[in-house]
Amino acid sequence: MKELQEMIENKQMIAVDCEGVDLSRFGSVTLINIGTRDLVYLIDILKIGNSVFDDGLRTILEDSEIEKLMFDCREDADALLHLHKVKLDGVLDVQILEVNNRIHVYRNGYTKIRSLKHCLELYVNDDTLLNIKLQGRSSMNMSSNIWEKRPLDENMLKYASVDILGLFKLYDALRTRMSHSVWKAASSRYCDTTRSRNRMYRDGSGILPKGVII
């Protein structure tokens, strides 16, 4: 954790992504990936346990001054809060940037959200990255609990890493489409949409909740 903290101190922005089985309060967080453009740390929550949060990870994730690129942070935030008592903050959700880029297209008040893979295909020219995503997705389709298996398959380690790198590439492609302050406020609201609700099951939706982008 010391190396990770030192890396963050020298960078203005990091990217964060969680992996798990049924990622939400109803499932598990097994891996937390944190990185910059140059370096990615894969933190094995399944192996290390909750002690890693007290060793500094909670401070990083809850610090609003540490800006964190994420993509659809809702279930990550829900799982972290309800399973590990971590209130994620400082999020800059790149999915919000992508939605804002085309929100005027929809006239009925509802805006469909796109997957990270779809967005990378649309905005990022990187076949190597996309091939790694495809290989990882194929493995996930064959095993619903693949993120709980140890040791992790090499394809899954690469998959986790390229999600971090892909966030920076997508950010570079879309960053000028929305003011930073508006984006950060919208991301904060997006973070709260799922974790603040009382719910009995994981209910994924392909529609952006109303009131996130104002």
Image: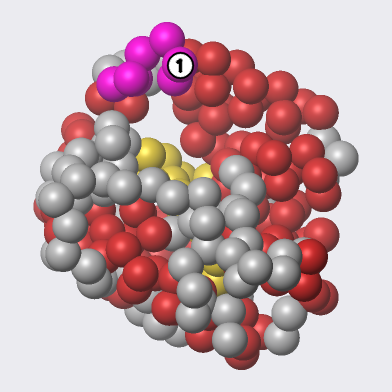
Q: Is residue 103 visible?
A: no
Q: Given the image, on which type of amino acid does mark 1 rest?
A: Asn
Q: Is residue 154 left or right of residue 80?
A: right
Residue 117 position within the rendered picture, expressed as x and y whole percent measured from the top left: 65, 38
In the picture, which quadrant includes the C terminus? bottom right
Range of the magenta residues?
A: 140-146
| Total numbered circles | 1
- The residue indicated by pointer 1 is 141
Q: Residue visible at 69% across and 40% down?
A: 118
Q: In the rendered view, tell whether residue 60 sits above or below residue 158.
A: below
Q: Is residue 197 visible?
A: yes
Residue 204 or 144: which is nearer the viewer? 204
Q: Is residue 38 left or right of residue 4?
A: right
- Dot 1, how many residues are within 10 Å of its Cα: few (below 14), some (14-19), or many (20+)? few
Q: Residue visible at 49% across and 80% down?
A: 211
Residue 181 position within the rendered picture, expressed as x and y whole percent measured from the top left: 61, 89
Farthest residue, direction bottom: 181
The verdict on residue 141 being magenta is yes
Q: Residue visible at 62% across and 28% down?
A: 133
How has the structure been colored for display? secondary structure
Q: Residue visible at 49% across and 74% down?
A: 210
Q: Is residue 157 left or right of residue 110?
A: left
